Image (spheres, grey):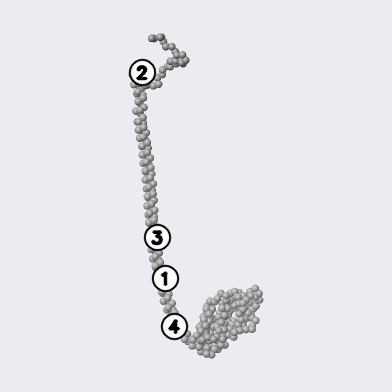
Amino acid sequence: MWSGPPQPDEGLPPPLAANSIPWKSAGPCKGCREAPGDLVDTCTREEAPTEEGPAAAKLDMSRLRSSSMEIREKGSEFLKEELCKAQKELRLKDEECERLSKVREQLERELEELTASLFEEAHKMVREANMKQAASEKQLKEAWGKVDTTLFAEFQAWRESPTLDKSNPFLERVYREDVGPCLDFTMQELSALVRAAVEDNTLTIEPVALRTLPAMSVAPVECGSTNTCALSGLARTCHHRIRLGDSESHYYISPSSRARITAVCNFFTYIRYIQQGLVRQDAEPMFWEIARLRKEMSLAKLGFFPQEA
C-alpha cells in the first residue's frame, strides 16, 4: 500500500543538491552534436598536419643525406689529395735514395780502384827502390872491396909499426883525404897554426862565459868579438874559444869550426892510443873504428854536426 512519498530517514545526511554547471565543449567527440559542415572542417584541420609531417621529415632526411654525401665527397677528395702528396713524396724520396745509392756505389768503386792503383804503385815503387838499393849496395860493396883491400893493407902495414909520421902511406892518405880538407878554413894562417897544434896535441878548446868575457885582440886576426868566427871570418855566435899551446891568446870559433876541429882531434887521439898500445883489439875492429872517425871528419867538413857543438 502506498503510503505517500518516502520520508527522509532520520539520522542520515541530507541528499546532495544538483548544481547547474555550464557546459563547455572540450573538443570534437562522438557525443558532440555539431553541424555536418563544422565536422568536416574540423576533421580536415586535424588531418592536415598528419599529411605535411612525413613530407617535411623526408625533406630533412634528404637534406641530411645530401650534406653527408657532400662531406664524404670532400673528405674523400682531401684524403685522395693527401695520399697523392704522400705518394709523390715517397717517390721523390725513393728516387733520392736510389740516386744516393748509385753515388755511393760509384764512390766505392772509385775508392777500390784508387786503392788498388795506389797499392800497385806502392809495390812498384818498393820493388824499384829495393832493386836500386840492391844495385847500389852491390856497387858499394864492390867499390869498398877494392878500396878496403888497399886501405886495410895500408892500415895493417901502419899497425905493425905505428907512427905519426905523415910520410906513412896510411897517414898520408888520411891527411890528404880527411884531415887537410877538414882543417882548411878561410883564415889560412890561423888554419896552419891550428893544424900544427892538433898534430902536437897542444890545442885547447874551452867554453865561453859570454857575460864575463873580456875583450881581447890578437894579431894577426881580430878575435875579440864573440859574434865573429876567427877561423871562417863569418858572423856567427861563438860559444867556444881555442888556445894554441902556451899562448895567452884566445880565438873565438863558431859551432861548425869547433865540430871540424873536434872530429880531427878524435882521430888523432885514437891513433895515439893505438901507437901507445892502449887499444887491445884485432886489426879489423881497429880499422872499422878508424873508418868511422874518417866518416865523422867528412860529415863535419860538409857542415853536419851535433847541435850541442
How far apart marks 2 and 3 lie (CA) works out to: 105 Å
Residue underneath mark 4 = 142
Please name whichever residue, 100 or 43, is drawn nearer the observer in this view of the structure. 43
| Rendered location of residue 3, percent (x, y) | 40, 9
Mark 1 neighbour density, 10 Å: few (under 14) some (14–19) many (20 or more): few
Residue underneath mark 2 = 33
Q: Do the residues labelled 4 and 3 touch (CB within 8 Å)?
A: no
Task: Give the residue type at disc 3.
Answer: Arg
How far apart marks 1 and 4 lie (CA) works out to: 30 Å
Q: In which quarter of the image is the C terminus?
A: bottom right
Q: Are marks 1 and 4 in contact (CB under 8 Å)?
A: no
Residue underneath mark 3 = 104
Q: Which mark is residue 262?
A: none
Task: Give the residue type at disc 2.
Answer: Arg
Horizontal side of 221 relative to 156 (left or right) equals right
| Rendered location of residue 167, percent (x, y) | 53, 89
- Which element type, helix, strand or loop, lies under badge 3? helix
Residue underneath mark 1 = 122
- Which element type, helix, strand or loop, lies under badge 4? helix
How far apart marks 4 and 3 lie (CA) works out to: 55 Å
Q: Quadrant of the N terminus?
A: top left
Residue drawn at x 36%, y 34% as measured from the top left = 61
**Residue 212 falls in which quadrant of the image?**
bottom right
Residue 58 in view, yes or no:
yes
Mark 4 neighbour density, 10 Å: few (under 14) some (14–19) many (20 or more): few
Compare marks 1 and 2 and give the one earlier in the sequence: 2
Q: Which of marks 4 and 3 is in front?
A: 3
- Which element type, helix, strand or loop, lies under badge 2? loop
Can you name the residue that lies furthest to the front here? 1
